[in-house]
Image (cartoon, helix red, strand yellow):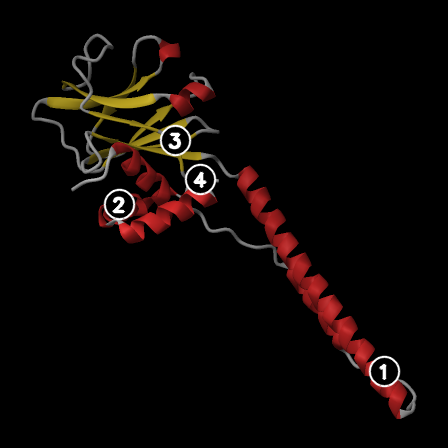
Amino acid sequence: MTVGPEDEFAAAEFALGTLSPGERAALAARRLREPELDEAIRAWEERLAPLAEAAPPIEPPGDDLAAIQARIRAASSPVTTPSPDASVVALRRSVARWRVGAIAASALAAVLAIGLVARETTRQAAPREYVAILQKDADSPAIEVTVDLDRRELRARPVAATAPPGKAYELWIIDAKLGAPRSLGVIGEGPRAANLSGYDRAVVEGATYAVTVEPAGGSPDGKPSGPPVFVGKLVPVGP
């Protein structure tokens, strides 16, 4: 038995990490009780695993951590003073321990704050990546479409699709604001790049992407020759 369309979409969002914390927790609990749902999530995780390899590493700032560690060492260094009586020594040691603890706690908070600021700064600066898996159904991924929304750059890559002999696959962007479908070019055996700078950002993000079977070289009149064989919509996968 397979899961329904809503659960299939939820499984894809679970694998992509786009669910809210509450929705993710609820789905994680369900997958423990429902083998079909667990299998659907695992299948999406396997399909989307190559996307993780494309994510660039994030380097934390180095200077700030070194400065914080220097402050901790300075606060922990012993101070030479005249020899007071035992009660004063005990009191000073107690105060020193509290002071070091407070500085360490402040330093930890500073490190966390620096990490959060660096992460948010990186997120704001990083391009917004979207992906669509064009397919007939959830079990038949055919073409992967990746879009850098900020740069309006599209890249299409065949996953498990080979055009019939003498034919070609052609990619289209479909949105009510555009009227008729617009061609984004013929997809060959390797990756296909397209520039979307001529399209509105909201259209690029919300459009349906589809593939039709066309004569070799593409549609002769700039219009789809038949119904789509693969379709999909973009979902965010980047910061």
Q: Earlier in the sequence, mark 1 or mark 2?
A: 2
Contact? badges 4 and 2 (CB < 8 Å): no
Per the image, label 2 sits on a secondary structure element best described as: helix
Q: Which of marks 1 and 3 is nearer the N terminus?
A: 1
Above or below for 50 versus 112? above
Q: How crowded is mark 3: few (under 14 residues within 10 Å), some or many (20 or more)?
A: many
Per the image, label 1 sits on a secondary structure element best described as: helix
- Please identify, in this view, whether the residue under mark 1 or under mark 3 is nearer the observer: 1
Residue highlighted by disc 2: 37
Camera-side residue of 104 and 157: 104
Per the image, label 3 sits on a secondary structure element best described as: strand
- Please identify, in this view, whether the residue under mark 4 or under mark 1 is nearer the observer: 1
Residue 149 visible? The answer is yes
**Which residue type does callout 2 highlight?**
Leu
Residue highlighted by disc 3: 147
Q: Which residue ends up furthest to the left in the rendered image?
A: 165
Please name the residue shown 74% across and 67% down the image: 103
**Which residue type does callout 1 highlight?**
Leu
**Which residue type does callout 4 highlight?**
Gly
Residue highlighted by disc 1: 91
Label 1 – label 2 distance at C-alpha: 62 Å
Contact? badges 1 and 3 (CB < 8 Å): no
Label 1 – label 3 distance at C-alpha: 64 Å
Residue 52 horizontal/vertical position (percent): 37, 47
Camera-side residue of 120 and 136: 136
Above or below for 106 versus 229? below
Residue highlighted by disc 4: 238
Q: What is the total number of numbered labels drawn onto the structure image? A: 4
Please name the residue shown 14% across and 19% down the image: 216
Specify the label residue 47 is tagged with. Answer: none
**Which residue type does callout 3 highlight?**
Val
Label 4 – label 1 distance at C-alpha: 54 Å
